[in-house]
Image: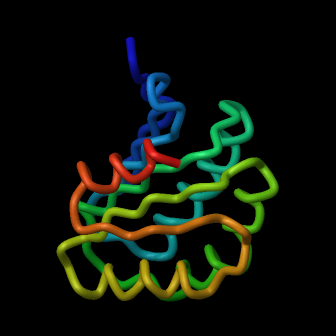
Amino acid sequence: MASRILYDSPALTISVNYLDDWLYLDWHGQLDDEAIVPGALKLLELLKQERCAKILNDNTHVSGLWADAAKWGGNVIFPQLHAAGCRYFSWVHSPERYSQLSAELAMQQTSAGITFMSFQDLPTAAAWLRRM
């Protein structure tokens, strides 16, 4: 089996892809700060457990504005992810503009040492991450 679900909540499903050696985050629904923070903390726990250096973050099924969580992510969670071993973060944008703005804010807020790239579709994001 190439992947396995490690965590499943109403806002986030996290699976490990053994073939590509990354964590895949599938965020879904109308996100807000209260939905994002617990998911991000679970991600940190699972990243330490699985010892992956790569994250494929899929916001394809996301809507909503989550600017406060974006700032928190940039200032708090991304530096912790880097300390736990994350080096590459491939981010697939939501088609919804407010969610895109929140994601851009999160990436701009951090100087964590993680290489971020954002994409409009999952296949392109996965292809970039495979090259890293």
Q: Nearer the viewer, residue 109 or 45?
A: 109
**Residue drawn at (56%, 47%) of the image:** 54
Looking at the image, residue 5 sits to the left or right of residue 125; the answer is right
Q: Position of residue 70 (x, y in %)?
A: 53, 80
Q: Quadrant of residue 11?
A: bottom left
Q: Residue furthest front?
A: 131
Q: Is residue 25 above or below residue 22?
A: below
Q: Which quadrant of the figure contains the N terminus? A: top left
Q: Residue furthest left?
A: 95
**Residue drawn at (22%, 60%) of the image:** 121
Q: Quadrant of residue 62?
A: bottom left
Looking at the image, residue 94 sits to the left or right of residue 56; the answer is left
Q: Position of residue 9 (x, y in %)?
A: 42, 45
What colouring does the structure picture have? rainbow
Q: Position of residue 2 (x, y in %)?
A: 39, 18
Q: Position of residue 119 (x, y in %)?
A: 31, 67
Q: Is residue 87 above or below residue 94?
A: above
Q: How many marks?
A: 0
Q: Nearer the viewer, residue 65 or 116?
A: 116
Q: Quadrant of residue 114?
A: bottom right
Q: Residue furthest top?
A: 1
